[in-house]
Amino acid sequence: MRPSRRSILAGALGTVALAGGCGEHPTKSTGSSATTSAPAAGPATAPTGPAGASPSAPPALPQTSPWTPGAGEIQPDVKLRAVQLVEALGTWPDGGQGTVRAGSRIAPLGLDPALADQAGPLLGSVDRAALQVIVAQYGGILADSASVLVVCEQWTQTAAGPVVPGGTTVDVRLSAATPRWTVTALHPAAPGLPASALSPAAVQVLANRRIILPPAAVADIRSGSVHESVLTAMLTLAAAHTLAVSVVRSGHPLNVFGTDRPSDHPRGRAFDVWQIDGHAVVDPATPHALVDGFMRAAAAAGSYNVGGPRQLSGGSTPNQFFSDATHHDHVHIGFET
């Protein structure tokens, strides 16, 4: 885990199931564990100058590890397909910047090089970049189409300058094909500019070390576009748990996947949690009682729409709890107001 982002990396692998998209219960009418090592910057040794001095060399980019699916995944190769594309787009050596070179990196994957034109913040004019996928989560999985939300950190560097941390979340759209699914579109997160002032709850969430936020989620909260009900619920849940958030507002499909109904995420009224107290939701070894108890705590914190890997009984409304294949890898927590 890198303290600067408080990110914990995990993935997962498993059997096939089909369902609708993330955002709210499918009947709502309105609107990984192959763990990857955390990147760590390695030391660089500078040559000794003619006068015997040893000027410092520029810092090296962090070392990264490819994301791999582990036990518990539905359609693991669908996620892997999306992740491999994002990793290829967002990582390059000296001289690899620009869309043309990015296209040449994804062509060996059997994907259209023109997809590089949709990479947005993953690309840039800097000399070199390194990318680490934090988690790959379904935004939706159907029989012939899918949305994979690839949550990542990225570090860039120009010439001998400093390493600049960043990152984003990319909604990767895929369709079924043989021998592997193919990528049809990329939708990178667009969090918006930071707000001039934040609510006390937003400030507390950003400072709370028990709420682990990826780059796009941090930007969402800093933009002031996340509803107070979401922020308050995060703080309430963090009193008893350490929660790793995958998606808040940006980087999520605008509609519940496979429908024309607006999702609560783009409106700043939902967040997804992929890891609870260090245990990935998708991991079969994660205690059911931990995830189920967390889902009930989310409902008690005011969520009208709590989705997860199992269908829970009870609730203040008939559809307060739901489960489907999309939500086997995270807990969705949505709010009406």
Image (cartoon, rainbow, N blue to C red):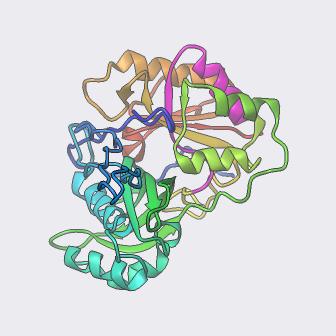
Q: Can residue 316 be seen in this view?
A: no
Closest to the observer, 45 or 328: 45
Residue at the image position 39 percent from the left and 15 percent from the top: 289
**Is 293 drawn above or below residue 226 in the view shown?**
above
- x and y, in percent, of residue 170 in the image: 47, 61
**Is 200 drawn above or below residue 47 in the view shown?**
above
Residue at the image position 27 percent from the left and 59 percent from the top: 78
Q: Which residue lies furthest to the left in this view?
A: 179
Give the magenta part as a residue range.
229-250
Q: Can residue 131 be seen in this view?
A: yes
Residue at the image position 44 percent from the left and 55 percent from the top: 154
- x and y, in percent, of residue 251 in the image: 55, 57
Relative placement, left or right, of 20 versus 336 is left
Closest to the observer, 5 or 114: 5
Closest to the observer, 104 or 47: 47
Q: Quadrant of residue 178?
A: bottom left
Relative placement, left or right, of 118 versus 238 is left
Does residue 251 belong to the magenta stretch?
no
From the image, which quarter does the N terminus lie in?
top left
**Is 96 drawn above or below residue 245 in the view shown?**
below
Q: Residue furthest front?
A: 51
Does residue 234 belong to the magenta stretch?
yes
Q: Which residue lies furthest to the right in this view?
A: 197
From the image, which quarter does the C terminus lie in?
top right
Relative placement, left or right, of 45 versus 300 is left
- x and y, in percent, of residue 244 in the image: 48, 33
**Is 63 drawn above or below residue 97 in the view shown?**
above
Residue at the image position 37 percent from the left and 53 percent from the top: 61
- x and y, in percent, of residue 101 in the image: 34, 81
Q: Quadrant of residue 77?
A: bottom left
